[in-house]
Image (tube, helix red, strand yellow):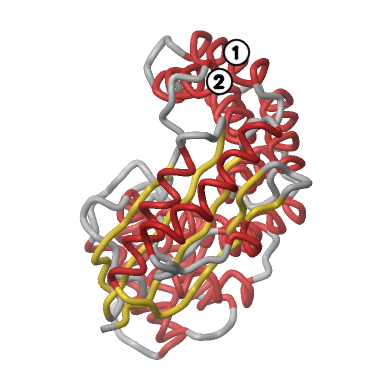
Amino acid sequence: MFFKTIIQGRLDFGTQNSYDKVAKMFQYRIDTYYKNEIIFKSEDIFKPEQLSLEIPRFVGNVSEKAFKNTTDLLAYCAQFAVSGTIRSWLLDNGEILQFELIEPQSDKAAVQSFIKGRSLVRESGKQDEAIAELSKAIEKHDRHAQAYERRAKTCFLLKNYNDALRDYNKCLNIDPTVASAYYGRARVLSIQEKWQPAIEDYDNAIKKSVALESIHWKARRLKGGAHFVLKEYDKALFELKLFVNRKFKKNDPNLAWRRWALFHYGVSCFETGAYLDALGAFNEAIELPDLTDGIDVSEILRYRGLSKNKAGKSGGIKDLKESVKMGNKKSSASLKEMAK
């Protein structure tokens, strides 16, 4: 039986000796243990000029045994690496049967400093220590793309945006496939209100990730938001419609942003004349919990009232009056305009 498989990522070995050793052992283990029941040939994924193993993205139908053999062999290779990440999924009709995250776990100094630094990034008051450990990893291996990305993330949390931008750039110069670096750089550019380059980076984050990952949908939502700020409502609709139609699992952080997405999707529908679609979005948004997503309930009511009015539905005046009670001055102005 064959299953859909997605594998992507990269391992860096740092030295010619480590690279030569793992390349030789890769082929030896294929011949000796796996009898060629493996997805990749060594010449397809080993890059001698980079001293790395690279799988930009593989999508195919393979047997469960071939998937297990391949991920086991890649995990073996990771023992020799100083940096990198490989992610792999085995799927059946869209359901994840198996997910493997393959990363170096050896006692090499660069590896251990990175692991420690990464664990401290979001610990309150530990960001300076995180930066120090991630910097140690970079000193040991100056092409440690993941360490640059995590150090950039830490700088972002500290609001050191110029330092964050510098490290995101360094990460992507080393490995232009790191989706989280595009996403992080886009967030910095958004804060700086550089919306067009931010949109380009969000788009790259979408392309370099897969729809099974939360970051893919975070990037779609924020790309839609950037188009919204630029009043490119047709383009915002494309991204936000995909987001609001997605069924997120309860533990997915994107679920908390559903009301935000529905509101911006609804406004985009309203601005493009799709009043019934707008009304549907606002009806759902008003029923969701009032989260700290920056959306004022009075604004949902205002737009729902305007959508009802434009669509020839009843209840628009009631929604606007309720919005006015909440202190929304724009709703008050809309009611005065309707009364003329």
Kind of residue at badge 2: Ala
Alpha carbon of mark 1 to alpha carbon of mark 2: how far? 7 Å
Instruction: Give above or below for 9 relative to 15.
Output: below
Image coordinates of residue 60 in percent, x first then y, are 46, 78
Kind of residue at badge 1: Lys
Callout 1 crowding tier (Cα within 10 Å): few <14, some 14–19, many ≥20 = many
**286 or 36: which is nearer to us?**
36
Asked if the residue under mark 2 is in contact with the one under mark 1, i.e. CB atoms within 8 Å, the reply is: yes
Residue 15, labelled with which disc?
A: none
Residue 110, labelled with which disc?
A: 2
Residue, x 60% and y 13% (percent of image)? 136
Image coordinates of residue 314 in percent, x first then y, are 30, 84
Residue 136, labelled with which disc?
A: 1
Residue, x 62% and y 15% (percent of image)? 135
**51 or 133: which is nearer to us?**
51
Q: In the picture, residue 92 is in which quadrant?
A: bottom left
Q: Is residue 144 left or right of residue 262?
A: right
Image coordinates of residue 87 in percent, x first then y, are 44, 53
- Residue 304 visible in image: no
Q: Secondary structure at mark 2?
A: helix
Residue, x 73% and y 48% (percent of image)? 48
- Residue 175 visible in image: yes
Q: Secondary structure at mark 1?
A: helix
Image coordinates of residue 194 in percent, x first then y, are 76, 46
